[in-house]
Image (tube, rainbow, N blue to C red):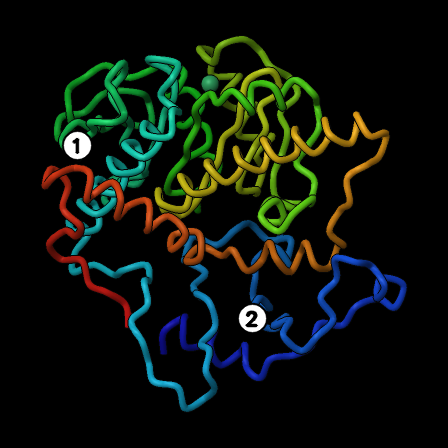
Amino acid sequence: MSTYRVWMTKRVPLKVARLPSALKHHRSIATTSRSPAAIVSNDFRETKSPPPSEFIYGAYQKVGGPNAKDVFRIRIPTFASLEAERAHRKLHHAAALRWLGYQGYNNEGAGGHVTVRDPIMTDHFWINPHGKSFSHMKPEDLVLVSKDGEVKEGGNMHSINPAGYIIHSAVHEARPDVVAAVHCHSVPSKAFSAIGCKLEPINQDACRFYNDHGIYSGFGGIAFNPDEGQHIADALGNTKGLILQNHGHLTVAKTVDGAAFLFGAMDRCIQAQLMADAACAGRGTKTIKVGHEEAEYTRKVYNDEMIYIMFQSAFEDVVKASNGELPAHVQGEIPRP
Ligand SMILES: [Zn+2]
């Protein structure tokens, strides 16, 4: 039985979320039977153990009742071989870089880096070549790097950003569950990271990061020293994102799709919090926060498969815009039922 089927049997029937009575009158709380609390019961964060390396599957629940016909759903695929999985990771890595470029995250020239762990040599990772435009990236442009920072044959023999290696190698080493990490310098995160606070659950999307991101408050200069990479990995801990004080932000996931989605999502949440806080300051008020239980419940919906799915419309846009340079699929990619 697949992990997904186990998950499916665990999540039915739906249960009504039980809320503390003191919270029942909170304006943000959903108290109806439409609140499917049980679908998130197997999230790893309910335990203190490290995040598992295997995927946590689960897209949106089926709608239309038990007799509704099955429909096609986008899922994380499986692969006929590790070589096929490598090709898929490189295709989606290049596509994620193109998307980041289209969004303006390549605006610091040679800054910004996305890494993806190799599925065969799992202590090696792929990284974008230093100084090359994100917006034209192809799988064959990606650089293969050993854990010691050596550029290896098999990938593009091109220089890499030393800070990218220092930060990302420490993250990949500290987090065996992490396949991909994304870090660029956005204008909102440069502003937000100077304030010294975390994201607050002020809207549904910000709840994705509720109690699930860190803050690194000890900026030690541009990350050319291995100690800085280690400090960043330590501050990330077991979470999915990090505010790097006086610097920017970084996200991680088990797919590059998920890490890229979380990077953009975190940036938009940062923008929203800056705007809401500025508006409240002008009005002399405070933002209204989502309740603890609802924030936790919402965060847990965004499991590994959900954040992969959330990026697939962007992947489709990139493939279409590439005019045939990037394929939609790789050989040996097998759709999950
Ligand atoms: Zn940086």
Identify the residue at horizontal 57%, vertical 66% (top origin).
40
Circle 1 packing at 10 Å, graded few (<14), some (14-19), many (20+), is: many
Q: Hey, which residue is sitting farthest front in the picture?
A: 283
- The residue lying toward the viewer, choosing from 287 and 224, is 287
Please identify the quarter of the rendering in which residue 74 is found: bottom left
Residue 67 marker = none
- The residue lying toward the viewer, choosing from 74 and 152, is 74
Amino acid type, residue under disc 2 in the picture: Ile
Residue 138 marker = 1
Can residue 124 be spotted in the picture? no
Please identify the quarter of the rendering in which residue 213 is found: top right
Identify the residue at horizontal 78%, vertical 45% (top origin).
288
28 vs 54, left or right, is: right
Q: Is residue 31 above or below residue 121?
A: below
Rounded to the nearest whole Å, what is the CA distance between mark 2 and mark 1? Answer: 38 Å
Circle 2 packing at 10 Å, graded few (<14), some (14-19), many (20+), is: many
Residue 39 marker = 2
Q: Label 2, secondary structure: give it.
A: helix
Mark 2 and mark 1 lie on one chain; the one further toward the N terminus is 2
Q: Quadrant of the C terminus?
A: bottom left
